[in-house]
Image (spheres, coloured by chain):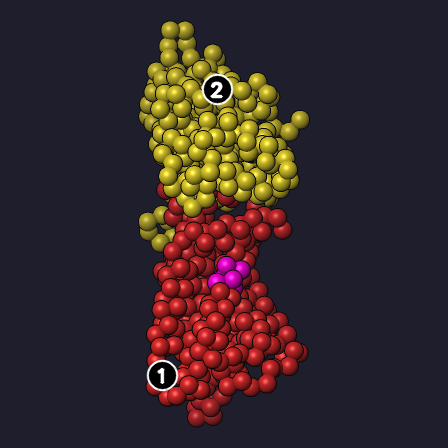
Chain colours: A yellow, B red
Amino acid sequence: MAKAIDIQDLVVEFPGARRGSAVRALQGLSLSVEQGHVYGFLGPNGAGKTTTMHVLLGFIRATSGVARLFGEDVRHTIARRRIGYLPEHPNTYRFLTGRELLHMAGRLFGLPRAALQARVAELLAQVDLEAAADRRLATYSRGMLQRIGLAQALVNDPDLMILDEPTSGFDPLGRARIRAIIAGERERGKTVFFSSHELSEVERLCDRVGILSGGRLVTEGSVAELVKAGESLEQYFISTIRSAAN
Amino acid sequence: MIQILTLAQVVWLEMIRRKDFYVLFILLAAFLAILMALDLFGLSQAVTYLKEIGLLLTWIGAWILAVSISARQLPQEERSLTIFPLLAKPVSRVQVLLGKWLGAWAAVGAATLVFYALLTGMVVLRGGTFDTLVLGQAWLLHLGFLGIVTALAIAFSTCCNADAASVLTYLITLGAWLILPRVPDLVLKVSGPTQAGLMALYYALPHLELFDLRRRLVYAWEPASSATVLLILIYGLLMAAIFLTLGALAYRNKRFTHGAML
Protein backbone atom coordinates (compact mmCIF):
# COMPACT_ATOMS: atom_id res chain seq x y z
CA MET A 1 0.00 0.00 0.00
CA ALA A 2 1.43 3.39 -1.01
CA LYS A 3 2.21 5.83 1.75
CA ALA A 4 -0.20 8.75 2.11
CA ILE A 5 2.75 11.15 2.06
CA ASP A 6 6.24 10.27 0.94
CA ILE A 7 8.91 12.97 0.82
CA GLN A 8 12.51 12.22 -0.10
CA ASP A 9 15.45 14.66 0.14
CA LEU A 10 13.31 17.69 -0.50
CA VAL A 11 15.16 20.94 -1.04
CA VAL A 12 13.40 24.24 -1.62
CA GLU A 13 15.33 27.40 -2.34
CA PHE A 14 13.91 30.88 -2.63
CA PRO A 15 15.74 33.78 -4.25
CA GLY A 16 17.70 35.73 -1.63
CA ALA A 17 17.86 39.48 -1.10
CA ARG A 18 21.04 39.80 -3.19
CA ARG A 19 21.13 38.91 -6.87
CA GLY A 20 22.18 35.30 -7.35
CA SER A 21 21.82 34.41 -3.66
CA ALA A 22 19.33 31.85 -2.38
CA VAL A 23 17.63 31.06 0.91
CA ARG A 24 17.13 27.37 1.69
CA ALA A 25 13.71 26.86 3.22
CA LEU A 26 13.94 23.05 3.20
CA GLN A 27 17.28 21.29 3.44
CA GLY A 28 16.91 17.69 2.32
CA LEU A 29 13.68 16.93 4.16
CA SER A 30 12.59 13.29 4.16
CA LEU A 31 9.45 12.08 5.83
CA SER A 32 6.62 9.67 5.28
CA VAL A 33 3.11 9.31 6.65
CA GLU A 34 1.32 5.98 6.62
CA GLN A 35 -2.30 5.77 5.55
CA GLY A 36 -4.76 6.03 8.44
CA HIS A 37 -2.42 8.00 10.68
CA VAL A 38 -2.89 11.44 12.20
CA TYR A 39 0.45 13.19 11.86
CA GLY A 40 1.32 16.39 13.74
CA PHE A 41 3.83 18.51 11.87
CA LEU A 42 5.47 20.80 14.40
CA GLY A 43 8.11 23.47 14.37
CA PRO A 44 8.74 27.08 15.29
CA ASN A 45 7.70 29.88 12.94
CA GLY A 46 9.87 29.85 9.81
CA ALA A 47 10.87 26.20 10.22
CA GLY A 48 9.48 25.29 6.80
CA LYS A 49 6.12 23.69 7.71
CA THR A 50 4.05 25.80 5.35
CA THR A 51 6.69 25.47 2.62
CA THR A 52 6.45 21.67 2.94
CA MET A 53 2.68 21.81 2.69
CA HIS A 54 2.89 24.13 -0.30
CA VAL A 55 5.19 21.68 -2.10
CA LEU A 56 2.78 18.83 -1.33
CA LEU A 57 -0.09 20.87 -2.76
CA GLY A 58 1.80 21.96 -5.87
CA PHE A 59 1.95 25.69 -5.07
CA ILE A 60 5.75 25.58 -5.10
CA ARG A 61 8.03 23.36 -7.16
CA ALA A 62 10.87 21.86 -5.14
CA THR A 63 14.41 22.74 -6.16
CA SER A 64 15.28 19.04 -5.82
CA GLY A 65 13.90 15.90 -4.24
CA VAL A 66 10.65 14.04 -4.64
CA ALA A 67 7.25 14.34 -2.97
CA ARG A 68 4.42 11.90 -3.51
CA LEU A 69 0.81 11.65 -2.33
CA PHE A 70 -0.52 8.08 -2.44
CA GLY A 71 2.31 7.23 -4.82
CA GLU A 72 1.55 10.05 -7.26
CA ASP A 73 4.11 12.77 -7.89
CA VAL A 74 2.75 16.02 -6.43
CA ARG A 75 3.57 17.84 -9.67
CA HIS A 76 0.68 15.99 -11.33
CA THR A 77 -2.87 17.27 -10.88
CA ILE A 78 -4.14 13.72 -10.24
CA ALA A 79 -2.19 13.64 -6.95
CA ARG A 80 -4.69 16.11 -5.52
CA ARG A 81 -7.82 14.05 -6.24
CA ARG A 82 -7.83 12.38 -2.83
CA ILE A 83 -6.86 15.29 -0.61
CA GLY A 84 -8.63 18.04 1.26
CA TYR A 85 -6.80 21.19 2.29
CA LEU A 86 -7.61 23.80 4.90
CA PRO A 87 -5.27 26.80 4.84
CA GLU A 88 -4.48 28.80 7.95
CA HIS A 89 -6.60 31.71 6.73
CA PRO A 90 -9.41 30.17 4.68
CA ASN A 91 -10.33 33.23 2.64
CA THR A 92 -13.10 32.60 0.16
CA TYR A 93 -15.02 34.24 -2.66
CA ARG A 94 -16.97 36.76 -0.65
CA PHE A 95 -19.62 37.25 -3.34
CA LEU A 96 -20.66 33.57 -3.17
CA THR A 97 -22.98 32.03 -0.60
CA GLY A 98 -21.77 29.20 1.61
CA ARG A 99 -23.79 26.69 -0.37
CA GLU A 100 -22.46 27.98 -3.70
CA LEU A 101 -18.88 27.73 -2.44
CA LEU A 102 -19.34 24.08 -1.50
CA HIS A 103 -20.99 23.35 -4.85
CA MET A 104 -18.10 25.01 -6.64
CA ALA A 105 -15.57 22.99 -4.64
CA GLY A 106 -17.43 19.77 -5.38
CA ARG A 107 -17.66 20.51 -9.09
CA LEU A 108 -13.92 21.14 -9.19
CA PHE A 109 -13.50 17.59 -7.91
CA GLY A 110 -15.82 16.45 -10.69
CA LEU A 111 -18.59 15.28 -8.33
CA PRO A 112 -21.93 14.73 -10.09
CA ARG A 113 -24.60 17.32 -9.30
CA ALA A 114 -27.10 14.91 -7.72
CA ALA A 115 -24.57 13.45 -5.28
CA LEU A 116 -23.24 16.91 -4.56
CA GLN A 117 -26.62 18.24 -3.36
CA ALA A 118 -26.74 15.63 -0.62
CA ARG A 119 -23.06 16.00 0.24
CA VAL A 120 -23.35 19.79 0.58
CA ALA A 121 -26.38 19.48 2.88
CA GLU A 122 -24.51 16.92 4.99
CA LEU A 123 -21.43 19.14 5.29
CA LEU A 124 -23.42 22.24 6.15
CA ALA A 125 -25.01 20.29 9.00
CA GLN A 126 -21.62 18.95 10.10
CA VAL A 127 -20.13 22.44 10.44
CA ASP A 128 -23.38 23.91 11.80
CA LEU A 129 -23.92 26.42 9.00
CA GLU A 130 -27.30 25.28 7.68
CA ALA A 131 -29.00 28.51 8.74
CA ALA A 132 -26.34 30.66 7.04
CA ALA A 133 -25.96 28.48 3.93
CA ASP A 134 -27.63 30.94 1.57
CA ARG A 135 -25.99 34.06 2.94
CA ARG A 136 -23.07 35.70 1.14
CA LEU A 137 -19.68 34.80 2.61
CA ALA A 138 -19.00 38.53 2.99
CA THR A 139 -21.42 38.47 5.92
CA TYR A 140 -19.76 35.52 7.69
CA SER A 141 -17.73 35.94 10.89
CA ARG A 142 -14.15 34.67 11.03
CA GLY A 143 -15.20 31.49 12.79
CA MET A 144 -17.93 30.84 10.21
CA LEU A 145 -15.41 31.33 7.39
CA GLN A 146 -13.13 28.84 9.09
CA ARG A 147 -16.00 26.35 9.28
CA ILE A 148 -17.05 26.78 5.65
CA GLY A 149 -13.37 26.44 4.73
CA LEU A 150 -13.29 23.16 6.59
CA ALA A 151 -16.47 22.00 4.86
CA GLN A 152 -14.97 22.74 1.42
CA ALA A 153 -11.88 20.75 2.42
CA LEU A 154 -14.14 17.78 3.19
CA VAL A 155 -16.38 17.99 0.13
CA ASN A 156 -14.68 15.14 -1.76
CA ASP A 157 -14.52 12.90 1.34
CA PRO A 158 -10.72 13.02 1.13
CA ASP A 159 -8.42 10.16 2.08
CA LEU A 160 -5.81 12.67 3.24
CA MET A 161 -6.51 15.99 4.92
CA ILE A 162 -3.77 18.60 5.00
CA LEU A 163 -4.58 21.21 7.62
CA ASP A 164 -2.43 24.27 8.23
CA GLU A 165 -3.05 25.54 11.77
CA PRO A 166 -6.63 24.23 11.68
CA THR A 167 -7.71 25.62 15.05
CA SER A 168 -6.31 29.13 14.78
CA GLY A 169 -9.17 31.57 14.77
CA PHE A 170 -11.60 29.21 16.46
CA ASP A 171 -13.27 29.72 19.80
CA PRO A 172 -13.17 26.77 22.27
CA LEU A 173 -16.37 25.30 20.81
CA GLY A 174 -14.96 25.55 17.31
CA ARG A 175 -11.74 23.88 18.42
CA ALA A 176 -13.70 21.04 19.94
CA ARG A 177 -15.57 20.64 16.66
CA ILE A 178 -12.30 20.49 14.70
CA ARG A 179 -10.89 17.92 17.11
CA ALA A 180 -14.03 15.83 16.74
CA ILE A 181 -13.79 16.00 12.95
CA ILE A 182 -10.11 14.95 12.98
CA ALA A 183 -10.87 12.10 15.38
CA GLY A 184 -13.81 11.07 13.20
CA GLU A 185 -11.63 11.05 10.10
CA ARG A 186 -9.09 8.82 11.85
CA GLU A 187 -11.82 6.40 12.93
CA ARG A 188 -12.86 6.13 9.29
CA GLY A 189 -9.29 5.18 8.33
CA LYS A 190 -8.44 8.55 6.80
CA THR A 191 -5.06 10.24 7.06
CA VAL A 192 -4.66 13.69 8.59
CA PHE A 193 -1.48 15.76 8.29
CA PHE A 194 -1.62 18.98 10.21
CA SER A 195 0.56 21.72 11.62
CA SER A 196 -0.27 23.37 14.88
CA HIS A 197 1.21 25.40 17.68
CA GLU A 198 -1.41 23.98 20.05
CA LEU A 199 0.74 21.18 21.42
CA SER A 200 -1.85 19.86 23.88
CA GLU A 201 -4.12 19.31 20.90
CA VAL A 202 -1.37 17.53 18.98
CA GLU A 203 -0.67 15.33 21.99
CA ARG A 204 -4.32 14.36 22.18
CA LEU A 205 -4.90 13.67 18.49
CA CYS A 206 -1.74 12.46 16.81
CA ASP A 207 -0.40 8.97 16.19
CA ARG A 208 2.95 10.43 15.19
CA VAL A 209 4.62 13.81 15.32
CA GLY A 210 7.55 15.26 13.41
CA ILE A 211 9.48 18.32 14.55
CA LEU A 212 10.98 20.54 11.93
CA SER A 213 13.68 23.11 12.57
CA GLY A 214 15.65 25.13 10.04
CA GLY A 215 14.19 23.18 7.14
CA ARG A 216 15.24 19.78 8.56
CA LEU A 217 13.28 17.10 10.39
CA VAL A 218 15.03 16.93 13.75
CA THR A 219 12.91 14.23 15.35
CA GLU A 220 9.96 12.00 14.60
CA GLY A 221 7.95 9.33 16.40
CA SER A 222 4.83 8.68 18.41
CA VAL A 223 4.19 10.97 21.37
CA ALA A 224 4.75 7.98 23.72
CA GLU A 225 8.14 7.28 22.13
CA LEU A 226 9.33 10.87 22.24
CA VAL A 227 8.00 12.25 25.51
CA LYS A 228 9.30 10.87 28.81
CA ALA A 229 6.92 10.12 31.65
CA GLY A 230 6.07 13.26 33.56
CA GLU A 231 7.13 15.47 30.67
CA SER A 232 4.72 17.29 28.34
CA LEU A 233 5.01 17.50 24.57
CA GLU A 234 5.53 21.23 24.97
CA GLN A 235 8.56 20.70 27.21
CA TYR A 236 9.94 18.13 24.79
CA PHE A 237 9.35 20.46 21.85
CA ILE A 238 11.15 23.39 23.49
CA SER A 239 14.18 21.31 24.50
CA THR A 240 14.37 19.73 21.01
CA ILE A 241 14.25 23.08 19.23
CA ARG A 242 16.86 24.56 21.60
CA SER A 243 19.26 21.67 21.13
CA ALA A 244 18.73 21.78 17.33
CA ALA A 245 19.60 25.46 17.35
CA ASN A 246 22.87 24.88 19.26
CA MET B 1 -13.86 20.67 -18.99
CA ILE B 2 -16.13 20.71 -15.94
CA GLN B 3 -13.43 22.50 -13.96
CA ILE B 4 -13.11 25.20 -16.63
CA LEU B 5 -16.88 25.72 -16.74
CA THR B 6 -17.11 25.85 -12.94
CA LEU B 7 -14.42 28.53 -12.75
CA ALA B 8 -16.10 30.44 -15.57
CA GLN B 9 -19.37 30.34 -13.65
CA VAL B 10 -17.68 31.91 -10.62
CA VAL B 11 -16.44 34.82 -12.78
CA TRP B 12 -19.95 35.20 -14.15
CA LEU B 13 -21.47 35.31 -10.65
CA GLU B 14 -18.87 37.86 -9.62
CA MET B 15 -19.83 40.18 -12.49
CA ILE B 16 -23.52 39.90 -11.70
CA ARG B 17 -22.92 40.68 -8.02
CA ARG B 18 -20.46 43.54 -8.39
CA LYS B 19 -21.34 47.10 -9.34
CA ASP B 20 -19.06 47.61 -12.40
CA PHE B 21 -21.56 46.42 -14.98
CA TYR B 22 -24.51 48.30 -13.47
CA VAL B 23 -22.53 51.54 -13.26
CA LEU B 24 -21.52 51.30 -16.92
CA PHE B 25 -25.06 50.37 -17.93
CA ILE B 26 -26.55 53.34 -16.08
CA LEU B 27 -23.92 55.70 -17.53
CA LEU B 28 -24.59 54.42 -21.04
CA ALA B 29 -28.34 54.74 -20.56
CA ALA B 30 -27.93 58.28 -19.19
CA PHE B 31 -25.72 59.38 -22.11
CA LEU B 32 -28.08 57.86 -24.64
CA ALA B 33 -31.08 59.48 -22.97
CA ILE B 34 -29.36 62.87 -23.23
CA LEU B 35 -28.51 62.23 -26.88
CA MET B 36 -32.11 61.24 -27.58
CA ALA B 37 -33.34 64.48 -26.10
CA LEU B 38 -31.14 66.53 -28.42
CA ASP B 39 -32.42 67.46 -31.86
CA LEU B 40 -29.68 69.62 -33.30
CA PHE B 41 -29.60 68.46 -36.89
CA GLY B 42 -33.13 67.35 -37.71
CA LEU B 43 -34.60 63.89 -37.12
CA SER B 44 -32.63 61.72 -39.57
CA GLN B 45 -29.25 63.13 -38.63
CA ALA B 46 -30.12 62.95 -34.93
CA VAL B 47 -30.67 59.18 -35.30
CA THR B 48 -27.34 58.76 -37.12
CA TYR B 49 -25.66 60.78 -34.41
CA LEU B 50 -27.32 58.65 -31.72
CA LYS B 51 -26.19 55.45 -33.45
CA GLU B 52 -22.64 56.67 -33.91
CA ILE B 53 -22.13 57.99 -30.37
CA GLY B 54 -24.10 55.11 -28.85
CA LEU B 55 -21.96 52.50 -30.59
CA LEU B 56 -18.79 54.32 -29.61
CA LEU B 57 -19.92 54.36 -25.97
CA THR B 58 -20.89 50.70 -26.20
CA TRP B 59 -17.40 49.86 -27.46
CA ILE B 60 -15.71 51.94 -24.80
CA GLY B 61 -17.93 50.51 -22.04
CA ALA B 62 -17.33 46.92 -23.15
CA TRP B 63 -13.61 47.59 -23.49
CA ILE B 64 -13.36 48.98 -19.95
CA LEU B 65 -15.45 46.14 -18.55
CA ALA B 66 -13.40 43.51 -20.40
CA VAL B 67 -10.07 44.86 -19.14
CA SER B 68 -11.21 45.49 -15.57
CA ILE B 69 -12.88 42.10 -15.14
CA SER B 70 -10.19 39.97 -16.76
CA ALA B 71 -7.08 41.78 -15.46
CA ARG B 72 -8.13 41.37 -11.84
CA GLN B 73 -9.09 37.68 -11.88
CA LEU B 74 -5.72 36.03 -11.18
CA PRO B 75 -4.16 38.81 -9.03
CA GLN B 76 -7.34 38.87 -6.94
CA GLU B 77 -7.06 35.12 -6.34
CA GLU B 78 -3.52 35.65 -5.06
CA ARG B 79 -4.27 38.74 -3.00
CA SER B 80 -7.28 37.19 -1.27
CA LEU B 81 -5.38 33.87 -0.90
CA THR B 82 -8.23 31.95 -2.56
CA ILE B 83 -5.67 30.62 -5.03
CA PHE B 84 -4.47 28.16 -2.36
CA PRO B 85 -7.66 26.18 -1.77
CA LEU B 86 -8.30 26.41 -5.52
CA LEU B 87 -4.96 24.92 -6.60
CA ALA B 88 -5.20 22.30 -3.84
CA LYS B 89 -8.00 20.75 -5.89
CA PRO B 90 -7.38 18.62 -8.98
CA VAL B 91 -7.33 21.69 -11.19
CA SER B 92 -4.33 22.52 -13.37
CA ARG B 93 -3.07 26.05 -13.75
CA VAL B 94 -3.98 25.96 -17.44
CA GLN B 95 -7.55 25.11 -16.45
CA VAL B 96 -7.57 28.03 -14.00
CA LEU B 97 -6.38 30.35 -16.76
CA LEU B 98 -8.91 29.04 -19.29
CA GLY B 99 -11.75 29.13 -16.76
CA LYS B 100 -10.99 32.73 -15.87
CA TRP B 101 -10.75 33.74 -19.53
CA LEU B 102 -13.92 31.92 -20.54
CA GLY B 103 -15.83 33.41 -17.61
CA ALA B 104 -14.59 36.94 -18.28
CA TRP B 105 -15.28 36.64 -22.01
CA ALA B 106 -18.77 35.22 -21.53
CA ALA B 107 -19.67 37.77 -18.86
CA VAL B 108 -18.45 40.74 -20.89
CA GLY B 109 -20.05 39.31 -24.05
CA ALA B 110 -23.41 39.08 -22.27
CA ALA B 111 -23.01 42.60 -20.87
CA THR B 112 -22.25 43.85 -24.40
CA LEU B 113 -25.42 42.18 -25.66
CA VAL B 114 -27.36 44.14 -23.03
CA PHE B 115 -25.62 47.37 -24.18
CA TYR B 116 -26.58 46.64 -27.80
CA ALA B 117 -30.16 45.89 -26.77
CA LEU B 118 -30.34 49.20 -24.88
CA LEU B 119 -28.93 51.12 -27.83
CA THR B 120 -31.26 49.40 -30.28
CA GLY B 121 -34.21 50.26 -28.03
CA MET B 122 -33.16 53.91 -27.90
CA VAL B 123 -32.65 54.07 -31.69
CA VAL B 124 -36.07 52.54 -32.31
CA LEU B 125 -37.66 54.98 -29.86
CA ARG B 126 -36.02 57.82 -31.79
CA GLY B 127 -37.61 56.50 -34.99
CA GLY B 128 -34.52 54.82 -36.43
CA THR B 129 -33.60 51.20 -37.05
CA PHE B 130 -30.66 48.80 -37.38
CA ASP B 131 -30.29 46.10 -40.03
CA THR B 132 -30.77 42.96 -37.93
CA LEU B 133 -28.18 40.91 -39.83
CA VAL B 134 -25.54 43.63 -39.63
CA LEU B 135 -26.36 44.11 -35.95
CA GLY B 136 -25.83 40.38 -35.34
CA GLN B 137 -22.56 40.45 -37.27
CA ALA B 138 -21.41 43.54 -35.37
CA TRP B 139 -22.08 41.86 -32.03
CA LEU B 140 -20.37 38.63 -33.09
CA LEU B 141 -17.25 40.47 -34.22
CA HIS B 142 -17.39 42.59 -31.08
CA LEU B 143 -17.28 39.28 -29.17
CA GLY B 144 -14.17 38.34 -31.16
CA PHE B 145 -12.57 41.65 -30.17
CA LEU B 146 -13.47 41.05 -26.51
CA GLY B 147 -12.00 37.55 -26.68
CA ILE B 148 -8.63 39.03 -27.66
CA VAL B 149 -8.76 41.83 -25.06
CA THR B 150 -9.69 39.46 -22.21
CA ALA B 151 -6.98 36.97 -23.23
CA LEU B 152 -4.38 39.73 -23.35
CA ALA B 153 -5.37 41.06 -19.91
CA ILE B 154 -5.35 37.56 -18.40
CA ALA B 155 -1.93 36.89 -19.96
CA PHE B 156 -0.47 40.09 -18.47
CA SER B 157 -2.06 39.34 -15.09
CA THR B 158 -0.08 36.10 -14.80
CA CYS B 159 3.05 38.14 -14.13
CA CYS B 160 1.78 41.63 -13.13
CA ASN B 161 -0.63 42.96 -10.56
CA ALA B 162 -4.14 43.93 -11.67
CA ASP B 163 -3.35 47.64 -12.20
CA ALA B 164 -0.24 46.98 -14.28
CA ALA B 165 -2.04 44.33 -16.33
CA SER B 166 -4.92 46.75 -16.98
CA VAL B 167 -2.63 49.60 -18.06
CA LEU B 168 -0.61 47.34 -20.38
CA THR B 169 -3.78 45.94 -21.93
CA TYR B 170 -5.28 49.40 -22.43
CA LEU B 171 -2.08 50.66 -24.04
CA ILE B 172 -1.61 47.71 -26.36
CA THR B 173 -5.23 47.47 -27.45
CA LEU B 174 -5.46 51.22 -27.98
CA GLY B 175 -2.19 51.21 -29.93
CA ALA B 176 -3.28 48.21 -32.00
CA TRP B 177 -6.66 49.79 -32.67
CA LEU B 178 -5.49 53.27 -33.60
CA ILE B 179 -1.96 52.86 -34.98
CA LEU B 180 -1.83 49.48 -36.72
CA PRO B 181 -4.18 50.46 -39.57
CA ARG B 182 -1.80 53.36 -40.37
CA VAL B 183 1.36 51.25 -40.35
CA PRO B 184 1.28 50.44 -44.12
CA ASP B 185 1.41 54.20 -44.86
CA LEU B 186 4.13 54.80 -42.26
CA VAL B 187 6.27 51.95 -43.57
CA LEU B 188 6.60 53.69 -46.94
CA LYS B 189 8.02 56.79 -45.26
CA VAL B 190 10.79 55.10 -43.22
CA SER B 191 13.54 52.60 -43.93
CA GLY B 192 15.98 50.24 -42.21
CA PRO B 193 15.39 49.01 -38.66
CA THR B 194 12.44 51.37 -38.11
CA GLN B 195 10.69 49.88 -41.11
CA ALA B 196 11.49 46.35 -39.93
CA GLY B 197 10.23 47.21 -36.43
CA LEU B 198 6.98 48.63 -37.79
CA MET B 199 6.45 45.55 -39.94
CA ALA B 200 7.11 43.28 -36.94
CA LEU B 201 4.52 45.21 -34.92
CA TYR B 202 2.09 45.05 -37.81
CA TYR B 203 2.21 41.26 -37.88
CA ALA B 204 2.62 40.60 -34.14
CA LEU B 205 -0.18 42.77 -32.73
CA PRO B 206 -3.84 41.91 -33.22
CA HIS B 207 -5.68 43.80 -35.95
CA LEU B 208 -8.59 44.97 -33.85
CA GLU B 209 -9.91 47.25 -36.59
CA LEU B 210 -11.12 44.12 -38.41
CA PHE B 211 -13.70 43.54 -35.69
CA ASP B 212 -15.27 46.97 -35.94
CA LEU B 213 -18.51 47.04 -37.99
CA ARG B 214 -19.82 50.29 -36.53
CA ARG B 215 -19.80 52.28 -39.77
CA ARG B 216 -21.61 49.47 -41.56
CA LEU B 217 -24.30 49.66 -38.88
CA VAL B 218 -24.54 53.45 -38.67
CA TYR B 219 -24.75 54.05 -42.43
CA ALA B 220 -26.90 50.97 -43.15
CA TRP B 221 -24.38 49.39 -45.50
CA GLU B 222 -24.73 45.83 -46.79
CA PRO B 223 -23.92 42.99 -44.38
CA ALA B 224 -20.40 41.58 -44.61
CA SER B 225 -20.09 38.17 -46.24
CA SER B 226 -20.49 35.26 -43.82
CA ALA B 227 -17.14 33.84 -44.90
CA THR B 228 -15.37 37.09 -44.02
CA VAL B 229 -17.05 37.26 -40.61
CA LEU B 230 -16.11 33.64 -39.96
CA LEU B 231 -12.48 34.20 -40.99
CA ILE B 232 -12.19 37.24 -38.74
CA LEU B 233 -13.67 35.28 -35.82
CA ILE B 234 -11.17 32.47 -36.42
CA TYR B 235 -8.38 35.06 -36.51
CA GLY B 236 -9.67 36.48 -33.20
CA LEU B 237 -9.74 33.06 -31.54
CA LEU B 238 -6.25 32.34 -32.85
CA MET B 239 -4.90 35.59 -31.38
CA ALA B 240 -6.67 34.86 -28.07
CA ALA B 241 -5.15 31.35 -28.08
CA ILE B 242 -1.67 32.79 -28.65
CA PHE B 243 -2.03 35.22 -25.73
CA LEU B 244 -3.45 32.51 -23.47
CA THR B 245 -0.61 30.16 -24.38
CA LEU B 246 1.94 32.84 -23.48
CA GLY B 247 0.05 33.45 -20.22
CA ALA B 248 -0.03 29.72 -19.44
CA LEU B 249 3.74 29.48 -20.00
CA ALA B 250 4.31 32.32 -17.53
CA TYR B 251 1.81 30.91 -15.03
CA ARG B 252 2.94 27.28 -15.24
CA ASN B 253 5.86 27.53 -12.84
CA LYS B 254 4.79 30.56 -10.85
CA ARG B 255 5.57 30.13 -7.14
CA PHE B 256 2.80 30.98 -4.71
CA THR B 257 4.77 31.66 -1.58
CA HIS B 258 2.44 33.47 0.82
CA GLY B 259 3.14 32.15 4.32
CA ALA B 260 6.06 30.01 3.17
CA MET B 261 9.43 30.65 4.78
CA LEU B 262 11.48 33.21 2.88
Q: Secondary structure at mark 1?
A: loop
Residue that numbered label 1 is attached to? B39
Residue A147: give x, y in percent of width and height. Answer: 44, 30
Question: In which quadrant of the rendered view does residue B32 lie?
Answer: bottom left
Quarter holding the N terminus of chain A is top right
Nearer-the-camera pick, B241 or A232: B241
Q: Please state if A136 lies on the left or on the right of A157 as rendered.
A: left
Q: Which residues are magenta?
A: B105-112
| Residue A115 tag number | none
Mark 2 on the same chain as mark 1: no
In the rendered view, tell whether residue A210 sits above or below residue B102.
above
Nearer-the-camera pick, B158 or B226: B226
Question: Mark 1, residues whose alpha carbon is within 10 Å: few (<14), some, or many (≥20)?
Answer: few
What's under tag 1, amino acid-wise?
A: Asp
Q: Main secondary structure of the magenta part?
A: helix
Residue A162: give x, y in percent of width and height. Answer: 50, 31
In the rendered view, tell whether residue A172 sits above or below residue B224.
above
Nearer-the-camera pick, A218 or A183: A183
Residue that numbered label 2 is attached to? A180
| Residue B15 visible in the displayed image | yes
The outermost residue toward the bottom is B189
At 47% from the left and 11% from the top, the residue drawn is A224
At 39% from the left and 21% from the top, the residue drawn is A173
At 64% from the left and 40% from the top, the residue drawn is A112
Q: Please state if A97 lies on the left or on the right of B133 as rendered.
A: left
Q: Secondary structure at mark 2?
A: helix
What's under tag 2, amino acid-wise?
A: Ala
In the rendered view, tell whether residue B8 sits above or below residue B108.
above
